[in-house]
Amino acid sequence: MPKVEINGKELNVDLTESEISQIQDLLQRGPSITEWGMFDVMHSEHCSYKSSRPKLKLFENAEENYDYVLAGPGEDAGVIDIGDGYCLAFRIESHNHPSAIEPYHGAATGIGGIIRDVLCMGVRPIALLDPLRFGTLKDNPHSQWLFKYVVKGIADYGNCTGIPTIGGEVEFDKSFESNCLVNVACIGLGTIEDFRHAPSKATTPGDYVILMGGSTGRDGIHGVTFASRTLTEMLEADRPAVQIGDPFTKKMIIEATLEAVKTGFVRGLKDLGGGGLSCALSELTGDGGTGGDIDMSKIFTREPGMNSFEIMLSESQERMTFIVKPEGLETVLEVFRKFEMAHAVVGRTNDSRVLKVHDGENLVVNLPATSLSDAPPIIREEKRPSYLDALLSQKTPEPTLELEDILYELIASENICSKEWIYRQYDHEVGVRSVVKCGDGDSGVLRIIGTNKFISASVGTNSKHCFLDPCEGAKGGLVEVCGNVLASGAKPLAMVNCCNFGNPEKPESFWFFSRAIDGIADFCKELRIPIVGGNVSLYNEDEVSNTAIKPTPVIMIVGVIEGKENIVTLPFKEAGNDILLIGDTKAELGGSEYHSVIYDLEGGIPPKVNQQKIKARWDLLLELYENDYVKANHDVNKGGFIVTIAEMCFKNRFGANLDLQDHDIYGLRDDELLFSESVGRFIIETSPKNLDEILEMAKKHNITVNKIGVIKSNPEINIKGLKKKQIKLDINKLKHLYDSTIPDLMEI
Amino acid sequence: MTIKIAVIQFPGSNCDLDTIHVLNDVIGVEASLIWHNHFKEAQFDGCVLPGGFSFGDYLRSGIIAAHSPSIDEARIMLKDGRPVIGICNGMQILTEAQFLPGALLRNDSLKFVCKWVNIKVENNKTAFTNKMNIGDNLAIPIAHAEGRYFTDNLKELEENDQIVFKYANEKGEITEEANPNGSMENIAGVCNLEQNCLGLMPHPERASEKILSPKNTTHGKLFFESMIEFIKRRTS
């Protein structure tokens, strides 16, 4: 690690030599120890996006190209106009490293951070979603420990703050064994006026700077620097870098902040997250074109004797900075007093464009406000890993097991089985908005009280597919998550992403990131989905075993449904109705659950995305909705479409008679047909009386739609039209297997 | 006359706005959100201690809120015969304040549990159940980590008809499988001797609108409608 010299003493900094000389050139003097610390955190990968920024330029500018986007990347959260005067703010973020060493507080403070990001857009946080990755659970106490406490951390924090956790996604794969992924997403709802009230900038000289909420302590110092390294053997030493969550204070901050914003006297609002005060103060003044004078002695600390370095770098949780109009100071302080929230006026803004922090007589920080956010980008080398060719050429073995037994095994596999064990622990109904509850739909659906509008949101991606082909895999993730929202009846409106990848300093790791971004940029442009925010988490590697995680570009999509009657859910509704498969099935078993569960294979040919076809399928689906033809919908995901159909049978204990003869247009093997994970397919339930019209509409869109069967009232799936033989599956047995896996592993 | 209901907002309450929404928009009474330190009983015909958390439920669920000045006000209200209901965390507060018998312990699963359950009406004479029939099986959700009801005086409760609800299965049978948290005798709600104070762990405010119910029910409304009926009868 490079060293800098201050007053004859050496200080370790996570800066490159060129960054150090650039800083010295800019200031024309040696920075103070506090200033070095601030540069250090603000130039970290986590705060500066220095490796990812050049690549992220590929994303279309959402604010310029979509008139309903009110705030795009670079803001604390993306904001879209959803009509009737309402807006949605949403964001997704990672809290991987803290959760890997302290799962409970790591996950909890992840939730805390994402709530603050949405709150500082001036709107009420109304929903949480959590995409997670762990090592496989079976025979792995470490993975079970991480899983159990991450879920508990999310539950305890989310439940206490009264924000429902309405959805999530989890995959188990050995590459995440020591570096688990905890991504957290939050959606906020408010009026456009609320949002306009509270930009994250200090635009006007003379305003007061108020710090409100928790006290500043020694926890979480250098958290972002820690997040910008790979996990090492020094885990214990890093534990103090994990913050401790306080959901009660967070709940109070939410109420006090929303009430303060309503006064109209708050001119700027910023949460204290990664980088603490250094980040908040420099971004508020830097982005607002102002400067600030801060009196450090006013900042309330958790313990005496904290120095300016510790105070400016602390990442203690539950703090917010307010920029308040002078005439409204008393009114805003009165709100904080009512909620008994600790607060202090710590300084004022001015027109100097310089951020100054005074510690008594000493000026400990004296920096141009924008200098901290100007970390120079780094162009990283990228190189396609040579091992991929061998993986891609892996062939699917001839099955030795009966197809029935394979299906029973798949439905019980960790990645396919029911996730009820998780969502039962989440209060997913608080707020009285949850119309489609966990397990009943492909996405969570929330109502907007007082309107006939509904919000649909989903998260996810497929890490195994991304590992084999990051570009197609990332697109596949988009197809899948958009598919979830569409399957609920909503049109996908906007996207945020959380890119979890390995060490960018290794060209092979960076190649995965680079190709995934190519895929996302291309897909979103063609399918007209604005990217309104993102988070990049690099350095997800286990240095002990020297393995990177499988690339995981998590996608979050929100959509809006107009009218209660247009909400679609997953369970089959009526025996006798038709089962239709939208989209065609190809021999795409690479990275499939079938390969991994049955043969312990990671390779093969992963699914490819045909963007025009996907678009046509979506258009068809929306047209079917307009005609009210769709009674149930579930997108085809892991394990293939028989798993999808089984899941649709479960709730009402239906069965199905299937005939697959017409669906196989490519001459596939039986296992390829049944277990392929070709993306962008849907299973829909429709009435037989509409079949002809539906097929006619499909023809018009040039889309493959097959009637593959009929819903039956007896709980049995019969499949004919296969090459080898007929299959009979017992729904009750499938359901029992589906429900038992996680409780059996976790409840000892 | 206009019926006025107070919904007490403790620091950290989180079903307060949900309850206000149901009372104002679904039931159609005048309900106000009152900050716990500002609550004055004389201005209201009844009050609701909402669910969620209070003071983060640090230390023990409901214990800090049980020492709020609003609890002294509620005590006056109860003595005067006006109705007070505690939902979920509100019930935990009412037991901690000893307005209601018993205590709520950690669920036997040791985990938070959020799901729809059924509860069977055991007593329809209380201020909050007069629109129900004994034996009615209500669909209603729970969401709690400390909901396992325990009392030393089960016999007394039974004799005094203070057990108001029991967890049941969909057929209305009171079985062990239907007990979501290990509550003694499947108890989901109890009342005071005078029957104007009710505490229950399930959330009626989440079960008052068809759109939120997996079974298209609105059983939660019955609690609030009973409360209004009780107030009307009392004051007429």
Image (tube, coloured by chain):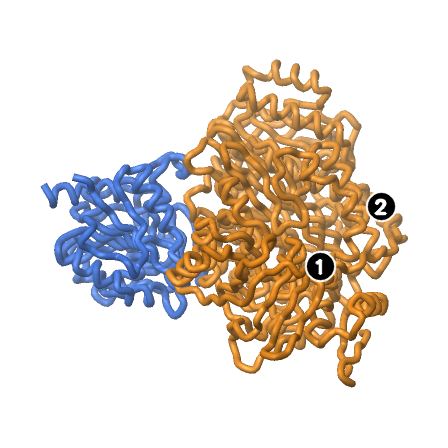
Chain colours: A orange, B blue
Q: Which amino acid does the dot numbered 2 rest on?
A: Leu
Disc marking residue A370: 1
Q: Residue at x 68, y 60 (%)?
A: A353
Relative placement, left or right, of A502 versus B81 is right
Which of the two discs, 1 and 2, labels the residue nearer the N terminus?
1
Considering every residue shown, the one lying at the far left of the view is B236
- Report the residue marked by disc 2: A392
Depth order, front residue of A106/A721: A106
Pointer 1 chain? A
Question: Where is residue B143 shown, x and y percent of the image?
Answer: 40, 53
Q: In this view of the protein, can residue B137 be seen by the observer?
A: yes
Q: Which amino acid does the dot numbered 1 rest on?
A: Thr
Q: Residue at x 41, y 35 (%)?
A: A450
Q: In this view of the protein, can residue A148 be seen by the observer?
A: no
Question: Where is residue B54 shown, x and y percent of the image?
Answer: 37, 61
Question: Mark 1 or 2, which is nearer the eye?
Answer: 1
